[in-house]
Image (cartoon, rainbow, N blue to C red):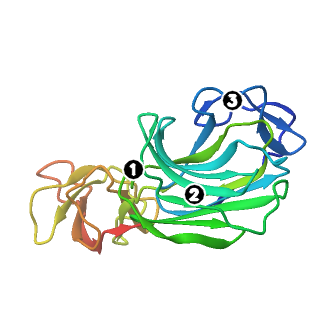
Amino acid sequence: MATLNFDGANGNYGDGFLQAGSWILEDGILRITGSAPSGDARILWESASNGSLTLRILDPKTSPSYAAIFFRATDLNNGFHFLNRAQDNRLRLIKVIDGVTQSPDLLDITPAGIGGASPRTLGVELDGDTIRCFQNGTQVGGDITDTFNQNATLHGIRTGSADYDFDYITIPDPAVAATKSITFDLHQDLVGVSGVNFLISPTPLGDSITSGALDTSSSTVTIDLDAFPSVAAGETLMLIATDKQAANDDADIIAWSSATVTEA
């Protein structure tokens, strides 16, 4: 999980991937300054489509406006909003498409026991098409199923008022693309030899997947295979390497090795 705790220097805040409204840092909190724009102030960061989000709100001053976790967004006008109104602790989960709130709300509940000016923590869990909403660690409402923007990876905050002070937000770490590679053992007679070329082929021997000059400075060599989508993790490949430069070179070395493609 990535935690944004807003401990930077006081002043204008512009580190969102997308944002609307005037956001500022002030003594370790994030808030807006001035009036919220049409559709409320919004700020989004790049993240991952699945995982947990939490938003800590300090001193909402019994605001009649809403503050929200804005999640699974593709831009500032498309995504979900888990809204909380401090005035009466009303909680709503809404879906917004092209700037228009869809009807009916996916969740509309007003839990008792949280005072209008009390700090509170909103939470959302995303697991495929399942959405769960939380306040102060307790799930509110049941599991909600919705496939809209299921693979969207922008998450953040929405607020309609400068009354809300945001202490921190946690978002899922951005997904890291898998990396395919293969590591071959080199024959001892090739280690340290210059002018060695190679080709990599499926097993049994077939069309060359890639070829070129070979780094023989170590007893193993690792080849990056991300550029070859047809090669799959778990596939066995063969390395053929030689320092042969001419057909009549009788002092050449030809060696081969096999290994399995891995994905990290």
Q: Which residue is drawn at 81% across and 40% down?
A: 163
Which of labels 2 and 3 is toward the front?
A: 3
Report how far apart the C-alphas of labels 3 and 1 lie in the structure: 25 Å
Residue 4 shows up from this direction: no
Labelled disc at residue 149: 1
Please state the horizontal and vertical placement of residue 72, each as a whole percent of the image. 48, 50
Report how far apart the C-alphas of labels 1 and 2 lie in the structure: 18 Å
In the picture, residue 56 is in which quadrant? bottom right
User: Seen in the image, is 154 located left or right of residue 129?
Assistant: right
Please state the horizontal and vertical placement of residue 129, each as a whole percent of the image. 39, 64
Q: In terms of depth relative to the viewer, which is nearer, 178 or 193?
A: 178
Q: In terms of depth relative to the viewer, which is nearer, 35 or 246?
A: 35
The answer to the question of whether label 3 and label 1 lie on touching residues, with beta carbons closer than 8 A, is no
Labelled disc at residue 173: 2
Q: Which amino acid does label 1 sit on?
A: Asn
Dot 3: element: loop
- Quadrant (top left, top right, bottom left, bottom right) of the C terminus: bottom left
